[in-house]
Amino acid sequence: MKYLIFITLITFLYSCNNSDSQDLLPIITKTKTNGQKVKKYLDNDTFLDVDVQALLKQKCIPSSRSTLNEKDALCKMKAAIYRFYSHVKIKDGKYSCSLTNAREINISNQLFSTLRQNLESGNVWIEKCKKEGKEIVIPEINEEYLNSLLQ
């Protein structure tokens, strides 16, 4: 348990120090949000645009109260992650996305680019581990994972 907390803390501090939007996604997926609002964004197919860098700064500055804008941005971000990763499958031992552009899932180009880069970073990590001879398990993107974004 201590090891898990340590890894989570290191990941969080690393992401805050590097201001890399790729490291924000694991933090967002673990953050509790209003599931009804996330689902509303999914059901209505609302166009989603989130300033990922601004959200990163907000998540890295601890606050006892989240603003309504931050809560809304987190819900939008989770809805965008849900839309994107609904089109991701494992192919040839790596994650593969069937989407070609942001319009297909009604999100901004910037947000689509961030999600695409996150996917590619994960694939680079998978390849690095394989080259180092590490045995890794690549989890499927399944309903359980997607439904966890609705919380």
Image (cartoon, helix red, strand yellow):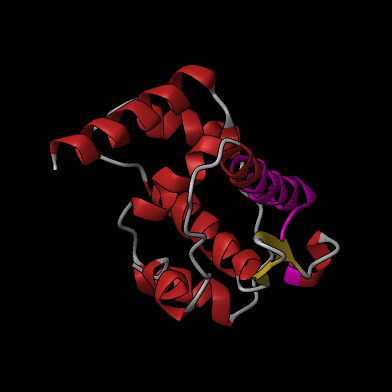
Considering the image in quadrants, where does the N terminus appear? Answer: top left
Q: Quick one: 138 or 56, which is closer to the camera?
A: 138
| Residue 58 shown left or right of residue 99 in the figure | left
Relative placement, left or right, of 150 versus 127 is left
Residue at the spot x=78%, y=70% of the render? 98
Q: How many marks?
A: 0
* Residue range of the region highlighted in magenta in the rendering: 105-125
Judge whether 33 appears above or below 114 on screen: below
- For this orientation, the residue located farthest to the left is 1
- Regarding residue 64, the answer to whether it shows in the image is no
In reply to whether residue 116 is colored magenta, the answer given is yes
Q: Quadrant for residue 80, please give it.
A: bottom right
Given the current orientation, which residue lies at the most extreme front position? Answer: 133
Q: Nearer the viewer, residue 104 or 41?
A: 104
Write down the quadrant of residue 33 in the picture: bottom left
Question: What secondary structure do most residues of the magenta stretch adopt?
Answer: helix
Image coordinates of residue 82 in percent, x first then y, are 55, 67
Instruction: Tell me: residue 118, above or below residue 105.
Output: above
Q: Quadrant of the C terminus?
A: bottom left
**Residue shown at the point (48%, 64%) measured from the top left:** 139
Give the percent coordinates (x, y) of residue 142.
49, 76
| Depicted 47 relative to depicted 60: above or below | below
Q: Residue at x 74, y 54 (%)?
A: 108
